Amino acid sequence: MGALPSLTALRAFDAAARRLSFTEAAEELSVTPAALSFQIKRLEEHLGAALFIRRARTLELTDAGRALAPGAAAAFQTLRIGWQSAQRAVATNRLTVTAGPAFTAKWLAPLLGDFAREHPEVELSLHTTLALLDLARDGIDIAVRFGLSDDAGLFSEALADEALTPVARPEIAARLAAPADLLDQTLIHDASLDFLPNPPNWARWLQEAGVAARPPSGPSFSQADHAVDMALQGGGVVLGRYSMVRRALRDGALAAPFDLALGVRAQYRIVTLPGQQDRPVVRLFREWLKRATAEPEPAWGRPRLVMVD
């Protein structure tokens, strides 16, 4: 089958095949169009066939080019991932963590100051996103994920469970003597768990509390922290996720007037690439995060928990 061509030529082809432009590919690789064209010509000579159909204003892949392009792209992606892994192994004090925006705002970010003071030697980078990042491709050391576990092929460990109960400003909570009193309040709807097969909501909580009436309509938020922020401003009562309201409950900014909470099967999890969980800096952050989020006594006490299946 013959020897493989040079990586330089294959890299030039990969860029040109993705962009279908010698000019744009040359800009990506920081070379001149003439240099890139020369490398592709060398590759075509090595193969003994054209890889591109060159027209006046367009560039198209030949059958041979289409056959080569997926393998070249995958090979360079594998090299990039391998190189990033090697860089992470060398950078023993660098740590890249990703988590969702709401979890970061209401739970993780307030704790990171403590981590920084305890471990000033660690260069921590935090990426907040709802996207499910590829840990290898995106250079992520640790991901904090929430949901029904789907971490096949990754190291994954439970961090915290989730439950929901009505919370409001203390002056509003003081007026709620019985669950039926909620019907006279502005109910804030948190839709962040609507992706679950049987999402917890006001209708389910009121049903479990023995209130037959339908909950009144109210503002609905796709992000849990935004729903909590409205409650913090005195805008109504939110069926608050504990991960989002625990600090406000401890600080007294919010109060939980009832002892009934809805539990969900979804969990927060710490996820890493297999084999990376015991890298010293990764293990350090994992153990710190588990200690920092552990609670001997939840801020809302020990509620009567009803699981939502």
Image: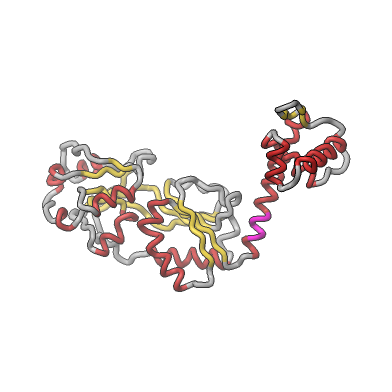
Percent position of residue 179, x then y: 15, 47
Taking depth in this image into account, of 264 and 183 the one nearest to the observer is 183
Indicate the quadrant containing the N terminus: top left, top right, bottom left or bottom right.
top right
Taking depth in this image into account, of 96 and 14 the one nearest to the observer is 14
Write down the quadrant of residue 248 in the picture.
bottom left
Percent position of residue 66, x then y: 73, 31
* Residue range of the region highlighted in magenta in the rendering: 83-87
> Is 208 placed left or right of 76 in the picture?
left
> Is 91 placed left or right of 213 in the picture?
right
Residue at the image point whose x is 70% and y is 35% from the top: 21
Write down the quadrant of residue 222 in the picture.
top left
Residue 167: within the magenta?
Answer: no
Answer above or below: position of 198 versus 80. above
Taking depth in this image into account, of 146 and 222 the one nearest to the observer is 222
Q: How many marks?
A: 0
Percent position of residue 196, x then y: 38, 41
Residue at the image point whose x is 77% and y is 28% from the top: 54
Label the magenta part by its dominant secondary structure.
Answer: helix
Write down the quadrant of residue 214 in the picture.
top left
Indicate the quadrant containing the C terminus: top left, top right, bottom left or bottom right.
top left
> Is 215 placed left or right of 240 in the picture?
left
Residue at the image point whose x is 53% and y is 66% from the top: 123
Taking depth in this image into account, of 115 and 166 the one nearest to the observer is 115
Answer above or below: position of 60 versus 158. above
Percent position of residue 44, x then y: 83, 35
Residue at the image point whose x is 46% and y is 47% from the top: 149
Answer above or below: position of 14 versus 284. above
